[in-house]
Every structure is written in C-alpha cells, then in structure tokens.
Image (tube, rainbow, N blue to C red):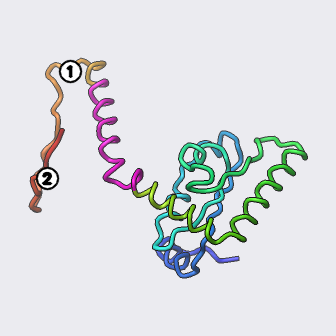
Amino acid sequence: YIEWKPYDAYKAMRHALGCDINLCPLSDDEFGRSKSCIKWYEGSIWPTPEATLAADCLPYNEEIADGETGLLYKPCPSMPTKAQQDETAEQFAANLETLILNPDLRRKLAEGARDWVYANRLYDKTVPGLFEYYQHLREKKAKEVEYAESPPRAVVLETPFKVSKKMSRVK
C-alpha cells in the first residue's frame, strides 16, 4: 500500500519505482464506459513505457490494439453472475501471468503503446480537431440564434506580452 501523494510526487514516485506493467481495470457498465484512457496514456509515455493490461470495454478497446499496444481481458458486466466473475478473474490472471513471464512481450507492447500515443494523442494531434469541432459548434449556434451581424471570428485581447505570428493565427 502506498499512501496518497500530491500529483507531482506521484509522478516522480511512479517513475522511480520502475513499474513495467500498468493495470487498467474497469467494469463494463455506464460508469466504466464514461472514463477516458488517461491511465493508459500516462503509463505509455514514461521514458521506459509500461505494458498495459486493460478491460476489453470502452474506452480502452477503442484505442488499445490487443496484442499490439496492450493486452485486453473480458470485464464483468454491471451485475455479474458468479460464472462471469470467475471468467473475468481467470482471464485477468492469465494475461497478467503472461506479462510477468514475458519481458520481451512487455517491451513490445509498451513500445507499441508509446508509439501509438505519441502519433495520436499529443496536443499537436488533438488540438486542431478540437478547435475545428468547437468552431463548428459555434457556427451552428450562430445560425440558430440568428445574429443581427455575423459574430466575430476571434476576440482580440490587449496583452503586455509579445505574441508570435504563429500563435496569433485564427482559422
């Protein structure tokens, strides 16, 4: 058991521990499906990334490729039977044992995850799409509200800081 730590201390401690297996358990229910993959992302971007064992449900099964960027196990539904609990426990234990006994597989999965996260989830990959999505919502709302004049495309704030041309562009 490790006591609760502030986030900065947690990051330093987790890296210092040298973990090489990242566990991402979830139940396959509405609460579990509302989660994000942040735990997988964080485990994948360390200088020495971690192999992940995650529940084969949303959000993990949309991003983790089983056997390539992590291992997935069948999670329990929200109201599991004894047989479903046993099946989940057996599959989880078998996949965890596979990771423990196979350092080459751990390394392969961890490196695959790191490569995928860097290629798909860094800010330069996600922010442009988010900007376009919010711009679309803004334009949709403007049509619904029927502005007397078209809404401004950007708000210009006076700032004491120099803003580079690259930063000041607005689509």
Task: From the viewer's perspective, tell me whether residue 68 is left or right of residue 164.
Answer: right
Amino acid type, callout 1 = Tyr
Residue 89 is inside the magenta segment? no
Residue at mark 2:
166
Q: Secondary structure at mark 2?
A: helix
Label 2 CA crowd tier, 10 Å (few <14, some 14–19, many 20+): few
**Which label sits on residue 147?**
1
Q: Position of residue 53 (x, y in %)?
A: 66, 59
Q: Nearer the viewer, residue 113 or 147?
A: 113
Q: Which residues are magenta?
A: 119-141
Which residue occupies 80% across, 51% down? 88
Q: Secondary structure at mark 1?
A: loop
Q: Position of residue 51 (x, y in %)?
A: 59, 64
In the picture as drawn, the residue positioned furthest to the right comes out as 82
Q: How many marks?
A: 2
Q: Nearer the viewer, residue 140 or 23?
A: 23
Q: Position of residue 33 (x, y in %)?
A: 62, 42
Q: Nearer the viewer, residue 117 or 112?
A: 112
Q: Are marks 1 and 2 in contact (CB under 8 Å)?
A: no
**Which label sits on residue 27?**
none
Q: Position of residue 23 (x, y in %)?
A: 65, 62
Task: From the viewer's perspective, tell me whether residue 130 is left or right of residue 74.
Answer: left
Instruction: Give the main secondary structure, helix, strand or loop, of the magenta stretch.
Output: helix
**Image-quadrant location for residue 19:** bottom right
Which residue occupies 67% across, 52% down? 72
Q: Quarter holding the C terminus?
A: top left
Task: From the viewer's perspective, tell me whether residue 61 is left or right of residue 15.
Answer: right
Q: Gap in Å between the C-alphas at discs 1 and 2?
A: 30 Å
Task: From the viewer's perspective, tell me whether residue 63 is left or right of residue 3.
Answer: left
Amino acid type, callout 2 = Lys
Q: Earlier in the sequence, mark 1 or mark 2?
A: 1
